[in-house]
Image (tube, coloured by chain):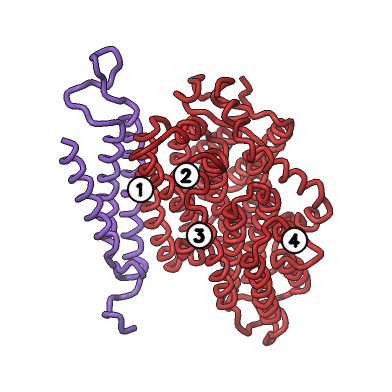
């Protein structure tokens, strides 16, 4: 058995435990441990990605208990892609936090690692209850991280975030109970097979369970009407944490894609809740436009851009053609990295402006604001989807694969709203200034972290063709659930 | 027995949801606790209810399903930890915001 598959879960788990043991005052040691763990994770993720790229789906049976009785970890192209994305995002996010933000509260580094462990585990697991457990791991860590740094705003946003997610967890458990009660299994592959054979009351119960699952995943992904917690929580969080949180909504989206592609792409339950998801995603897009235009702070504006990307992605999934997932995954990579970069950049701008922070009002000029304004310009072009950067490539590919007038109109209007909001924000922040600023100059490590994330957008544009082929290959593997089923359950599935 | 368990779950969840919708943090914490109790009993019942049977295969002719018991144990542990965390968070918000309203605003009957 190939033991490497469990490494993305074990590396952060070990690092997190080490960090709990280390002496609190030795910040240098803790930073090095955290960064080393992130680097190791990146290397492992790329290694696993290379392995998954051959097209083989590798299954790791925990404790060597065979599926469907034991819990399995499954590595296919989609999980590998998400693992690489997490590692690529986590390293600069942690690097940014290592410039002092990590000292504003105890155990930041350990929580960061546990969060990564939960995210990686959620991407790898092939068991629904295990998915719940990893969701809880990442949520518990994220509660701590969201509150990191203290302050009344954070506590208020954190309280809403925690309560909502606890209710979400309760719903998740009810859905799992119904799934186990009707199909007698919690293994995703086994569930996908057994669900097809259900009839009568069991089928109705399963319908309810799956619709509840959509609600839970929708809460994690921040879909209308369950996104109201996101702007406050993300805009309030410390910059490095907010950048890492850019992947959290995508975990919800990933769970939707996984369950949908396995069990509900065809068969008697095909398209369950799909039209609801479609309309909710479109409403999310529309409301995110309003949010982007109405934001009073740059952090809130970026949070609404995250919500916008979620609407875009879920609509592409709910359109019902798994072909659209290829471009959607490209857009997911792009939006996660750029939104992460924008959160970091917003914090740099806030530091540079001193007391006004990232409020979108006239304030002092940023010392040496030239570099930051160029970065902001690049990031804005990328995230809105103007040529020539990756947002444009992603949106064109999405528009071509989702030929629906409502989607076209909303996506283009969303781009326009983003453009208006960001150019207004940019001109307020950089041009309409009063006198010299008293803020802090960015440290070199800050700039490295921001550049790392923002330069990936031009890179993704240059390598757009191979990347799109890659994400299309991921979607192709998803379109054939039999590959997954036979890998997990053995040849007889 | 099924009816009794169903009623218990229903009452627990209904009171949990009602309390969750209150505007003070303490009722919300209580509501979440009741909700998680209801969910735990529900999970426990998901493998089917059997009277006086052990959960070990081979010890009785008709053993009860052991898996829900393992799952509910996990759920209880997670739920308990989360409740503890939420209590601490509620105390923190009381300390920082100087009131126990979930929105951090003093309750003025909607005037502000």
> In the rendered image, which residue does mark 1 sit on?
A170
Chain ID at mark 4: A
Chain ID at mark 1: A
Which numbered disc, 1 or 4, marks the residue that appears first in the sequence?
1
Which numbered disc, 1 or 3, marks the residue that appears first in the sequence?
1
Mark 3 or 4, closer to the camera: 4
Mark 1 or 3, closer to the camera: 3
CB-based contact (under 8 Å), mark 3 and mark 4 = no
Q: Are marks 2 and 3 on the same chain?
A: yes
Which tint is chain B? purple
> In the rendered image, which residue does mark 2 sit on?
A135
Q: Are marks 2 and 4 on the same chain?
A: yes
Q: Position of residue A262 (x, y in %)?
A: 55, 38
How far is the residue under mark 1 from the one under mark 3?
18 Å
Quarter residue A12 falls in: top right
Q: Which mark is residue A460?
A: none
Farthest residue toward the right? A462
Q: Are marks 3 and 4 on the same chain?
A: yes
Which numbered disc, 3 or 4, marks the residue that appears first in the sequence?
3
Residue A254 appears in the rendering: yes
Image point (28%, 35%), residue name: B44
Q: Position of residue A238 (x, y in %)?
A: 55, 60
> In the rendered image, which residue does mark 4 sit on?
A396
How far is the residue under mark 1 from the one under mark 2?
12 Å
How far is the residue under mark 1 from the one under mark 4?
39 Å
Which tint is chain A? red
């Amino acid at each position: 058995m190939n033991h490497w598959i469990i490494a993305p879960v074990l590396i952060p788990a070990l690092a997190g435990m080490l960090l709990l043991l280390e002496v609190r005052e030795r910040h240098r040691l803790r930073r090095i441990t955290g960064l080393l763990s992130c680097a190791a994770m990146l290397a492992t993720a790329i290694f696993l990605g290379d392995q998954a790229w051959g097209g083989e789906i590798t299954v790791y049976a925990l404790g060597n208990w065979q599926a469907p009785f034991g819990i399995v970890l499954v590595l296919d192209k989609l999980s590998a892609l998400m693992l690489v994305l997490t590692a690529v995002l986590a390293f600069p996010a942690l690097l940014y936090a290592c410039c002092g933000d990590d000292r504003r509260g105890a155990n930041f580094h350990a929580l960061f690692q546990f969060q990564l462990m939960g995210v990686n585990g959620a991407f790898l697991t092939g068991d629904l209850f295990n998915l719940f457990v990893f969701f809880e791991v990442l949520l518990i860590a994220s509660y701590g991280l969201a509150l990191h740094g203290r302050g009344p705003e954070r506590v208020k946003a954190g309280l809403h975030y925690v309560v909502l997610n606890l209710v979400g967890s309760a719903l998740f458990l009810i859905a799992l109970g119904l799934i186990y009660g009707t199909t007698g299994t919690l293994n995703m592959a086994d569930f996908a097979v057994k669900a097809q054979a259900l009839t009568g009351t069991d089928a109705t119960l399963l319908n309810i369970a799956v619709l509840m699952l959509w609600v839970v995943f929708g809460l994690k992904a921040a879909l209308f009407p369950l996104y109201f917690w996101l702007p406050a929580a993300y805009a309030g969080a410390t910059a490095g944490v907010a950048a890492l949180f850019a992947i959290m909504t995508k975990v919800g989206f990933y769970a939707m894609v996984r369950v949908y592609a396995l069990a509900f792409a065809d068969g008697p339950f095909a398209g369950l809740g799909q039209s609801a998801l479609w309309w909710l995603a479109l409403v999310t897009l529309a409301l995110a436009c309003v949010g982007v235009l109405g934001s009073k702070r740059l952090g809130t504006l970026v949070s609404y851009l995250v919500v916008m990307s979620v609407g875009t992605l879920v609509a592409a999934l709910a359109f019902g053609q798994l072909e659209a997932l290829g471009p959607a995954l490209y857009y997911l990579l792009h939006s996660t990295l750029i939104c992460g970069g924008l959160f970091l950049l917003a914090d740099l701008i806030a530091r540079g402006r001193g007391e006004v922070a990232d409020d979108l009002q006239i304030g002092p000029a940023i010392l040496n604001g030239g570099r930051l304004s160029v970065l902001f310009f690049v990031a804005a072009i990328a995230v809105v989807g103007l040529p020539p950067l990756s947002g444009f490539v992603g949106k064109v590919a999405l528009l071509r694969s989702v030929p629906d007038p409502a989607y076209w109109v909303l996506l283009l209007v969303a781009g326009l709203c983003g453009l208006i909001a960001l150019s207004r924000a940019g001109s307020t922040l950089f041009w309409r200034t009063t006198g010299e600023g008293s803020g802090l100059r960015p440290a070199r490590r800050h700039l490295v972290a921001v550049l790392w994330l923002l330069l990936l957008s031009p890179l993704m544009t240059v390598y757009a063709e191979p990347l799109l082929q890659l994400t299309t290959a991921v979607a192709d593997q998803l379109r054939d659930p039999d590959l997954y089923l036979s890998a997990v359950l053995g040849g007889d599935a | 027995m099924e009816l009794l368990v169903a009623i218990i779950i229903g009452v627990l969840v209904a009171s949990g949801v009602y309390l969750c919708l209150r505007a003070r943090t303490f009722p919300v914490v209580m509501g979440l606790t009741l909700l998680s109790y209801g969910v735990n009993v529900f999970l426990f019942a998901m493998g089917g209810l059997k009277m006086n049977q052990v959960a070990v295969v081979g010890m009785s002719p008709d053993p009860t399903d052991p898996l829900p018991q393992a799952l509910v144990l996990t759920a209880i542990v997670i739920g308990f930890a989360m409740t503890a965390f939420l209590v601490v968070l509620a105390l923190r918000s009381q300390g920082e915001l100087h009131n126990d309203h979930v929105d951090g605003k003093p309750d003025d009957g909607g005037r502000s």
